[in-house]
Amino acid sequence: MHSDLPKFTVEIVMTNKVRVRFAPSPTGALHIGGIRTALYNYLFAKKHGGDFILRIEDTDQTRFVPGAEDYILGSLAWLGLNTDEGIAQGGPCAPYRQSERKDIYMKEALRLVEEDKAYYAFDTPEELDEMRERLKAAKVVNPVYDNVTRMSMKNSITLSQEEVQQRLDRGDPWVIRLKVPKREDVRLQDLVRDWVVVNTANIDDKILIKSDGMPTYHLANVVDDHLMGITHVIRGEEWLPSAPLHVLLYRFLGWENTMPRFAHLPLLLKPTGNGKLSKRDALKHGFPIFPLSWKDPETGEFSEGFQEAGYLPEALINFLALLGWNPGTEQEMFSLEELIEAFSIERIGKSGAKFDIEKAKWFNQQYIKLKPAAELSAFLHTELASQHIECSPEKAAAISELLRERITFPAELYTKGTYFFAAPDEYDEKIVAKKWNEEAVSILSHYALALETLEGVFTSEAAHITLNKVLEENNLGMGRILQALRLALTGSGAGPDLFGIMDVIGREEVIHRLRKAINQLTYEKKA
RNA sequence: GGCCCGUUCGUCUAGGGGUUAGGACGCAAGGUUUUCAUCCUUGUAGCAGGGGUUCGAAUCCCCUACGGGCUACCA
């Protein structure tokens, strides 16, 4: 039965190994929804010990965007969604770029024509427009090229064999259309939505081969999925309406008994209002929509990616996994390995999910708290180096430790900690008004003095003990002074452990900042 | 318009005839903390509407409404 197929296809079909594919078009940056589709495919494949294949659907030459392929590869790599076969490493079903498989599709299309399951059509775009106008005028509800209208068009069904041959020989432009049967229910059992039934009366004679010789998506994806031994097609819901057409194609091509199972994923929706999530929404609400930054080579428009915005890949994965799927338990945090273990198509929801960036931020924060200290401090260290700010690895580690529980993004390690490197120039006015007074100035002056004469190694403990002594001498509690001290050292009323900060910036700097604050703030108050 | 799919707190969701409708984000309050954050506790808020079926419906069926997708020689 498989005698006409490549050997590897037969082998794959025989082994029953799960094989799924992620099949984006290289028309630009990958949208976050595409990433989720890739993720679900990956999880399903790995859950079942199967293969995850990357295929590039570049059959529309007019929409090809340079750099898009590399972008796709880079995005998957960043997220750790490793492919088993694809354009990067090849594989038994190579090539994995549809433009390089042109002949394969043509062969199958011609076979369909021969078997009277498809036909040549010679209609020009103008003639097609005319047809639609005519049908509209005649109040036809659905003006399409179908089993009725094809009888009044120029194709190998209406034209004589001689004329068809003449036109082909002459080099007239032609396409191949599927000869969709009249009124027949096509049903498929979707893994997410269960039975879906469509009558062929609602399916038009879809173009299989375009006039440039390239296949359309419909033909190419069916042929490739078959030849590549794909067992499960997991893709976005936007493909659901054409799924019955694909079933019809499998049937006509004689492959229905090994047809893959389908799972149509719910869409990712706008955070507010209605509709499919788009780049505009991301712009409007100030969050990324692409995994990596992307500069549109045509418009030059730049979009910051999740990576550059400071999202950790594990956080993005976790967030995305739960957008449309749930484990059925109350577990929220999942590593990629845990996701693989827990994943199942049965637990994918049916309805669209609104994209809520707040939850993504929460996941990011959680994962930052889980990050090894060394990683955070290494990040901070290289970041500072690139900004030509001097910082020892030890200092970077200390800062990371102080800040790690109060940040959502790694970059906040330096944006929220500028005072570790320079004395504040400005002081939070509200705190000044509330906490900066004669008493504070007096105590802080004493404290500066006490620190000056302090002996031994300066540590956070020493700083603490010294302050306690000063306060005791003046019969005051810690609460009376700490905010003013923080203000003097950092310029702000909020932040991590003060004595820890002092330890990092050192005794001299603490004294310097106290004096500076006393001078500057006292002066300003008088003025 | 036609075809297809969907509808539980503001958001992500659990639930598959009998539950005080559960969890998470967010928000609010309280506690811990030298401040902020973290953390802990508590609270807030939901089955789109109408008909059936049933002793009993968030759960099953139908209708309506609303939402979404598709309707190209794009994927």
Image (spheres, grey):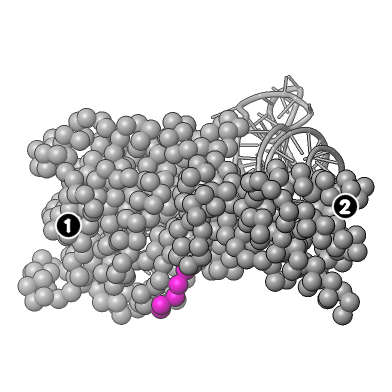
Q: Position of residue A378 (x, y in %)?
A: 46, 51
Q: Position of residue A266 (x, y in %)?
A: 50, 48
Question: Which residue shows up at 92% across the image and 47% down it?
Answer: A475
Residue underneath mark 2: A480
Question: Which residue shows up at 58% across the image and 43% down it?
Answer: A369
Residue farthest along the right direction in this orientation? A475
Is-magenta flag for residue A301? Answer: yes
Residue underneath mark 1: A101
Q: Position of residue A352 (x, y in %)?
A: 55, 50
**Tag on residue A212?**
none
Question: Which residue shows up at 19% across the image and 31% down it?
Answer: A14
What is the magenta range? Answer: A299-303
Question: Which residue shows up at 22% across the image and 58% down it?
Answer: A98
Chain letter behind tag 2: A
Dot 2: within a 10 Å radius of its alpha carbon, few (fewer than 14), some, or many (20 or more) residues?
some
Q: Is residue A112 above or below residue B72?
A: above
Q: Is residue A57 above or below residue A194?
A: below
Q: Position of residue A462 (x, y in %)?
A: 71, 45
Res A102 visible? yes
The amino acid type of the residue labelled 1 equals Arg
A316 left or right of B35 in image = left
A78 left or right of B49 in image = left
Seen from the viewer's position, the closer of residues A469 and A420 is A469
Work out whether mark 1 precedes mark 2 in sequence or the reverse, and give the earlier one: 1
